[in-house]
Image (cartoon, helix red, strand yellow):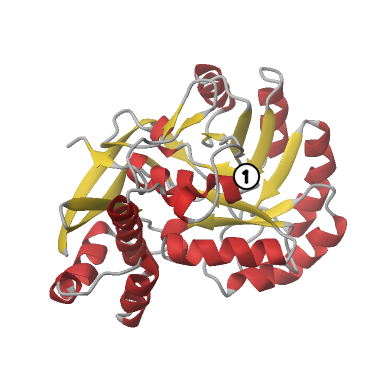
Amino acid sequence: MKIELKKYTLPLKHTFSISRESHDFQNTLISALSLDGKTGYGEATSNPYYKITIESMMEEISAIKNEIEVFNFTTPEIFHAFLVSKNLSNFAICALDLAAHDLYGKLKEKPLYEIWGTTKEKYPITNYTIGLDKIDKMVAKMKEVPWPIYKIKLGTDDDVAIVKALRKHSDAVFRIDANCAWTAKETILNAPILKDLGVEFLEQPLKADNWEGMEMVMHQSVLPVIADESCIVESDVEKCALHFTGINIKLTKCGGLTPALRMIKKGKDLGLKVMVGCMTESTVGISAIAQLLPQLDYVDMDGPMLLSADIATGAQITSDAKVIFPDIAGSGVSLLQ
């Protein structure tokens, strides 16, 4: 295989804020794996919370470039096991694993969802994320993109007031993501108020390691609670089943589609609701998520919708919230630049 790596800076339409950080752009690494005239593309973004930079990922991958290029590629799963044996970060593995899956599908001339034995007839609608901001700006962002489901980022002393203000301007389903900013007591007290305001579920209200607090929430919250920061890798799924009603799998955090497929199965076996989320990726990463749609209960794949300029074509989200699956095989990705 031939491998190429390239850094892109993705410009956002608006400053994007959550409880712990804000940014106006997203740095991302695009990997390309080529074999027999086909090229597969993968993506992984930088992330300060997990201390991941584009430079650190490129350094990791470049250190084993020669081994990758002589690797006898047969399936993404075998390639993923090879990458794990090299002790790369999950973010770096994700960039390569997504490229390997896209390449594999293109070599087989089939979309990944078909290779996995699923169809595109039924799939969940993505939410559209409203970043944390002053209330008037959050309302303006919501009005800018009329949508059936919004994920509202919270983490202030006035979170309930924010949701009440937003509810005056929309009948859409709301999902709440506090990104670890609440206490167990806050969560339990806020839940019935938010439920009355049309909130579907809460995502990661407590700090990732606050398992005792989450046990309280599970017993007393009137709203379902989905794990995000508490569910990073495959081994987290079983523990989350005792403390959450569902899990949000991030491809970058777990190491790509290969482990994500196993996490989806494990989650379902344990009776969990399963969601896959994004990290403001371009269409490269979102097209990989799109291939998983038939297997999911919920999805957050609005990354390209938050960008002022994209770098690829692939899966498209229409203005009426439908997904147009690519005609190209694999994940269906082609780079624009």
- The number of callouts visible is 1
Q: Quadrant of the C terminus?
A: top left
Residue at image coords 51%, 50%? 292
Question: Three-letter amino acid code at disc 1?
Answer: Tyr
Residue nearest the viewer, comparing 159 with 243? 243
In which quadrant of the rendered image does the N terminus lie? Answer: bottom left
| Residue 66, horizontal then vertical, whole percent | 13, 74
Q: Estimate how packed mark 1 is, as few (under 14), some (14 to 19) or many (20 or more) residues with alpha carbons within 10 Å.
A: many
Relative to 18, residue 129 above or below: above
Element type at marker 1?
Answer: strand
Can residue 72 be seen in the rendering of this structure? yes
Q: Position of residue 282 (x, y in %)?
A: 34, 41
**Would residue 130 appear left or right of 12 to someone viewing this image?**
right
Between 183 and 145, the residue placed more toward the observer is 145
Q: Pick the residue in front: 12 or 311.
A: 311
Across and down, in percent, residue 128 comes to 54, 33
Note whether 9 is above or below 173 in the view shown: below
Q: Quadrant of residue 15?
A: top left
What residue is rendered at 53% in x and 28% in y?
322
Q: Which residue is mark 1?
A: 298
Tell me: residue 56, above or below residue 119.
below
The structure residue drawn at horizontal position 32% and vertical position 28%, both measured from the top left corner, is 308
Using the image, determine if residue 154 lies above or below residue 81.
above
Query: Residue 186's spot in the image, x, y percent?
Result: 76, 51
Q: Determine whether, in the image, residue 289 is placed left or right of residue 175.
A: left
Residue at 65% in and 47% down: 297
